[in-house]
Amino acid sequence: MTSPSQPPHNPPSVPDTAPQLPRRALLDTTVQLDRQKTEARRQKLESILAEFDWKFSTGISLVEFKATVIQECITIHNQLRRTGARFTRARDALLEKKGRQISLRAHIFNNLLHVFASSFDISEETDSRLAEKARLLLENIIPQLYDWFAKESVDTVLNDRIACDRANEPPRKKRAAFEINLPECKRGTNKNCHVERVIRQAGPQLTILLEPHITHSDQLRNAVDTFRKVLENTKTELSHGDCRRAGDCLIALEAEGKATHVLSSNAREWKPLSDVLGFEFVQIAFPEEKTV
């Protein structure tokens, strides 16, 4: 008598236990600024950042943050501390000027200061009191913004390869006004960074790789021109303005070998930089804010 055939034995499947590589996200300056602009942007970015194991920014990004939102806060503070300052007059004067940072000033007034008034229905006395209130608020907000970026916003702020001195200087208030936010870099006086050395080491290859992209990006063209200035003259000493012109490239070099992903709203510069340096680019957008 033959025994019934047995079904083939299939061993239980073994789950894939291979460890996942940690996802390390570089946050460029646009992301850091957006986290401070509105609560809706902050919430969306926090949900994206939760997907990464390690989040970091760089010293050059911190310099850019100081030169934008912190500098605009200092500008507003200086306007409000003038003799006889009135809040609505200072606000309207600052927002009516032309310039790249007008929208950033509006974000500061609307989302950081929390001081509101209409110039049509406020007394001069109340307007003066609001100017004083806003000025005192800024004296807390300005150092808090720096501390948030440097100590709270990310797991770390990388600044070892370039070691930017300006990034390590918090805004300081003197008797009435804040000191210059970004003092000029002077080797032997207040500058001990390695930016020229980093450019001479990595610049020749990076400029070649970026050459096909500079026709589509003024920022990358400015960065490549800054790199070439250093490469062609061994005595060139950059200042913070030069470093800001080469900002994205310097940020990328600081993160090279450390980041797996780059988060930015700026695809024109960061997509080619990610391609040539081996990052995965994650473009940040806020389509819900688009007007019809």
Image: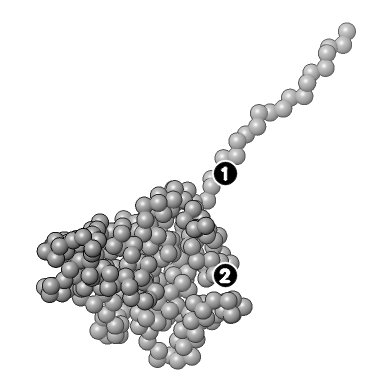
Where residue 84 sits: x, y (%)?
A: 13, 72
The mark that comes first in sequence, 2 or 1, is 1
Q: Pick whichever, 175 or 231, lies toward us.
A: 175
Query: Height in image: 196 above or below 255?
Result: below
In the structure shown, which secondary structural element does the residue marked by tag 2 occupy? helix
Determine the residue positioned at 23% across, 70% down.
90
Left of 94 or right of it: where is 226? right
Using the image, tell me which numbered label, if any, was put on residue 159: none
Q: CA distance from mark 2 to mark 1?
A: 31 Å
Left of 35 or right of it: where is 269? right
Determine the residue positioned at 48% across, 90% down.
232
Colour scheme of the picture = one colour
Where residue 288 sits: x, y (%)?
A: 49, 53
Residue 130, image quadrant: bottom left
Q: How many marks?
A: 2
Q: Residues within 10 Å of mark 2 (few under 14, many from 20)?
A: some
Left of 190 or right of it: where is 40? right
Q: Dot 1 corresponds to which residue?
A: 18
Query: Can residue 203 be seen from the camera position used here?
Result: no
Q: Residues within 10 Å of mark 1 (few under 14, many from 20)?
A: few
Residue 13, image quadrant: top right
Amino acid found under the numbered disc labelled 2? Pro
Where residue 112 sits: x, y (%)?
A: 28, 59
In the structure shown, which secondary structural element does the residue marked by tag 1 occupy? loop
Image quarter (top left, top right, bottom left or bottom right) of the N terminus: top right
Q: Dot 2 corresponds to which residue?
A: 272
Residue 237, image quadrant: bottom left
Amino acid found under the numbered disc labelled 1? Ala
Left of 146 or right of it: where is 276? right
